[in-house]
Every structure is written in structure tokens, then in C-alpha cells.
């Protein structure tokens, strides 16, 4: 990760901290993820990892703040094909609004959908969580299909590595900025 990304991540860290504090994770998941990432503020780093993967904190966006052929909106790359109302509202231009939106409408629903299929994940909370992060990219139905077929949760993501790459970026950001 280059210095420009690290500088932008540091600048946005208070927004990621605030957004992370709003997640109502079950204690078992929080414990598993604290062990997995080695930090009690693990969700901060996951959100920052998503921001890095999606847009390098805005560095990969066009002059209007879009990517993915115009379908990805803002630093978190909220897709207008799945989230038309939010993208039409222009709230996506505000990172805090985008972080709130993805909490309520992307990450928590994906986690809940996949938690209903917990047995697919070997009842491993960290694997379930990373499945929800893979779903950020390809949708929870695709992740559920992959794990039901005993495939890696990232099988249907762009590059077939979405959650692993977000995890790698989270760890790198945590090491650089914590």
C-alpha cells in the first residue's frame, strides 16, 4: 500500500472508528474476530480494508467519484444496480453516510443471511464473518452457494480473493496506523 493510501486512511480513521462502533455483533463473533485480526477494534480495520480494496480511498475514482464503469459510487463503491435509491440520493458522496448505509443495508443483512446457514461455515464465526465480507462484493446468495458446494467463500468474488484481500489490507492498515 502506497503512502497516498496510508495518508488517506489515516485522515478517514475517525469516520471508520465511528462507523465500526455502530455494529451490534454477537459476543462470539467479536471474540473470534479479535483473535483473527489481533485487535479489539477489528471492525475499524475491516471497513478501512474495504475502502482500500474498493477505491484506494478514492484514488481510483473518476472526477465524479465513481468507478466500475460508473456503477460504483463513492469510496465504498456502492453499486447503483443493487442500491439505486441510495445512489440517486447523492448521499454516497459523504463517506459517513455510505458507511451507515452499508452497515444497515449490506454488511449486517449479508451476515444475518449467512448466519442462517451457519452450518455451511463449520460453525466458525470468523469464516462466517469473512463470508459476509465476500458478500459485499458478490452478494450473500453467491457466497451461500459457494460454501454449500464446499467451495471457498471468495469463489464467486472479483479476483476470487475479495475477503482475503480485505483481510490482508486490514492487517496492513492496522500495522501502519494503530
Image (cartoon, rainbow, N blue to C red):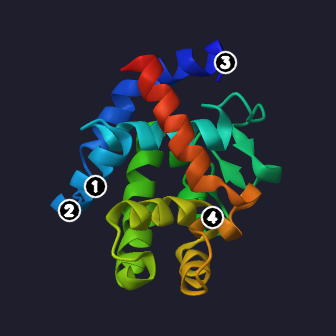
The spot of residue 21 in percent (x, y) is 24, 43
Residue 39 lies, with reference to residue 164, above or below; the image says above
Q: Which residue, given by chain and number where applicable, does mark 3 sit on?
A: 2
The residue depicted at 56 percent of the width and 81 percent of the height is: 141
- Tell which circle, 3 or 2, labels the residue nearer the N-terminal end: 3
Residue 32, labelled with which disc? 1
Can residue 123 be seen? Answer: yes
The residue depicted at 67 percent of the width and 55 percent of the height is: 161
Camera-side residue of 9 and 169: 169
The residue depicted at 63 percent of the width and 64 percent of the height is: 154
Q: Disc 3 on helix, strand or loop?
A: loop
Assess whether mark 2 and mark 1 are in contact (beta carbons under 8 angstroms). Answer: yes
In three-dimensional space, the C-alpha distance between marks 4 and 3, rounded to whole angstroms, equals: 25 Å
Q: Is residue 112 left or right of residue 87?
A: left
Q: Disc 1 on helix, strand or loop?
A: helix
Assess whether mark 2 and mark 3 are in contact (beta carbons under 8 angstroms). Answer: no
In three-dimensional space, the C-alpha distance between marks 1 and 3, rounded to whole angstroms, equals: 30 Å
- Tell which circle, 1 or 3, labels the residue nearer the N-terminal end: 3
Label 3 CA crowd tier, 10 Å (few <14, some 14–19, many 20+):
few
Q: Is residue 117 left or right of residue 168?
A: left
The spot of residue 74 in percent (x, y) is 61, 42
Q: Disc 2 on helix, strand or loop?
A: helix
- Tell which circle, 4 or 1, labels the residue nearer the N-terminal end: 1
Q: Which residue, given by chain and number where applicable, does mark 2 sit on?
A: 28
Q: Which residue, given by chain and number where applicable, does mark 4 sit on?
A: 154
Mark in front: 4 vs 3: 4
Quadrant of res 83: bottom right
Quadrant of res 113: bottom left
The spot of residue 128 in percent (x, y) is 41, 68
Amino acid at each position: 500500500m502506497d503512502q497516498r493510501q496510508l495518508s488517506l486512511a489515516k485522515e478517514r480513521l475517525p469516520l471508520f472508528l465511528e462507523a465500526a462502533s455502530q455494529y451490534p455483533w454477537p459476543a462470539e463473533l467479536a471474540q473470534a474476530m479479535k483473535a483473527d485480526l489481533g485487535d479489539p477494534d477489528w471492525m475499524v480495520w475491516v471497513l478501512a480494508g474495504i475502502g482500500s480494496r474498493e477505491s484506494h480511498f478514492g484514488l481510483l475514482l473518476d472526477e465524479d467519484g465513481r468507478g466500475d464503469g460508473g456503477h460504483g459510487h463513492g469510496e465504498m463503491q456502492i453499486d447503483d444496480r443493487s442500491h439505486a435509491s441510495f445512489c440517486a440520493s447523492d448521499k454516497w458522496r459523504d463517506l459517513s453516510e455510505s458507511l451507515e448505509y452499508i452497515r444497515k443495508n449490506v454488511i449486517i443483512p449479508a451476515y444475518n443471511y449467512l448466519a442462517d446457514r451457519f452450518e455451511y461455515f463449520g460453525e466458525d464465526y470468523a469464516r462466517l464473518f469473512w463470508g459476509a465480507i465476500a458478500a459485499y462484493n458478490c452478494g450473500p446468495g453467491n457466497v451461500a452457494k459457494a460454501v454449500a458446494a464446499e467451495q471457498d467463500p471468495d469463489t464467486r468474488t472479483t479476483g476470487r480473493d475479495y475477503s482475503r484481500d480485505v483481510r490482508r489490507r486490514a492487517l496492513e492498515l492496522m500495522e501502519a496506523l494503530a
